[in-house]
Image: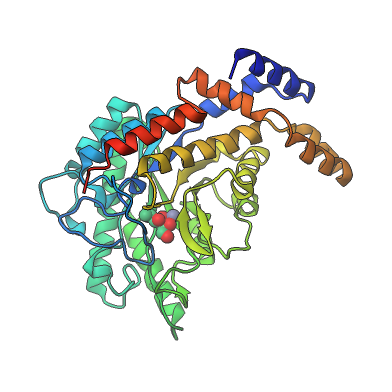
Amino acid sequence: MTKQSYDTARAIFAEWGVDTEAAMARLAGIPISMHCWQGDDVVGFEAKTGASGGGIQATGNHPGRARTPDELRADLEFAYGQIPGTHRLNLHAMYMDTDATPDRDEIEYTHFATWVEWARDQGLGLDFNPTFFAHPKADDNLTLSHPDAGIRDFWIEHGKRARDIAARMGAELGSPCVNNIWVPDGYKDIPVDRMAARQRLETSLDVMLADAHDPAHMLDAVESKLFGIGVEACTVGSHEFYLGYAIRNQTLLCLDMGHFHPTENVADKLSAVALSLGEILLHVSRPMRWDSDHVILLNDDILAMAQELVFADLLDRTRIGLDFFDATISRTAAWVIGTRNMQKALLRALLMPMAELKSAETALDYSRRLILTEEVKDLPASAVWQEFCDRHSVPIGIDLSNVLSKYDLSVGSRL
Ligand code: RNT
Ligand code: ZN
């Protein structure tokens, strides 16, 4: 893409009252929290092997899965190298990097210190997650809401330790670490005491979150879900449960795009929950018939989400995280494609003639609103994206495709 086409695009957007330079500058300041678990199919580095469990599942056997922290870091470095801007890494507790074999209720900062040193070198922020699945004590698909107090206490201890580790990560890196809590708790068939389960979950969360942490170092988030495989009848931590919990306890609420009924518009929820919440965490994902966590596309759902973030002025109080895991394709390509798609969607939103559109709506001129939204789709946003990639020295088009394929081939001999 030549310089000239960007200059033309810039002039065309200017006619619409849109400043492409301002849009690119804003986009450059939006970190995306890339999830480590796309790199190894949610297996982790604990002294165990096994499936993810808890109603989530990575399917496929494309070669190249990272098997060690070093391989995962090498893959991440490659992926970040193809993504414009400076971003974050979202780690799960199961990704500890240590020769020790701590159980979940024994994890400590030292088990993650190499990740922090690496993140510091790379200029990355870190986010964190306690891992409440893929463990014998989660085999009942009940953790913090388990009727057995011993099992609840085990998971409460895990959660407390995860918060301490996250706070230290945030302090070390000078950037608040979001510690996101998702538990798989639920029932395959219709429970008769939903209230008791929800009360147990609430009490466990209260105990787990009791210690105050400096928000400059760590921010708590809670993630709801509609259902998972094996927990079709009831999810204890439903949307209503966590919306209330987050408001009462002033935590972030995590909205995962795969965790609602397939016909619900998750973008529509942002402005609704933002009125009652301080900050929001997103898990941008792509459900297909269920919470299948496909790599995100530049599709209407993602564009709508990005547009809401921009139009509702929520960028400064929304942490954008990704959550997908496809094991049928190159793990690194999945990261690069998905993260760039999130950025492309944000750029398109930033390039919209927002004031013009809002004023048409306020004037009840829905014809004009529709004309504008449809005409805007023909504006040369791709020339601005290409310019953005060029300025950040990352490849596009065929060049990107070749770089991704070459790397994928280079890791193909991993067993
Ligand atoms: C599961 C949740 C959760 C996980 C990660 C691995 O349905 O979306 O966020 O995907 O914690
Ligand atoms: Zn999620």
Residue 179, x across and y down, in percent:
37, 48
x 45%, y 20%: residue: 393
Q: Can residue 364 be seen in this snapshot?
A: no
Q: How is the image coloured?
A: rainbow
Count up the numbered dots.
Answer: 0
Up the image or down, 116 lies above or below 8; here it is below
Residue nearer the viewer, 296 or 91: 296
x 37%, y 59%: residue: 59
Residue extending furthest left?
Answer: 100
Residue 326, x across and y down, in percent:
40, 52
x 31%, y 78%: residue: 147
The quadrant of the picture occupied by the N terminus is top right
Q: Is 48 positioned to the left or the right of 366 in the image?
A: left
Up the image or down, 55 lies above or below 299; here it is below
x 27%, y 72%: residue: 139
Residue nearer the viewer, 266 or 145: 266
Q: Can residue 392 be seen in this snapshot?
A: yes
Up the image or down, 275 lies above or below 13; here it is below
Residue 355, x across and y down, in percent:
77, 33
Q: Is 352 positioned to the left or the right of 223 in the image?
A: right
Residue nearer the viewer, 379 or 355: 379
Residue 225, x across and y down, in percent:
48, 63
Ligand number 2: quarter of image: bottom left
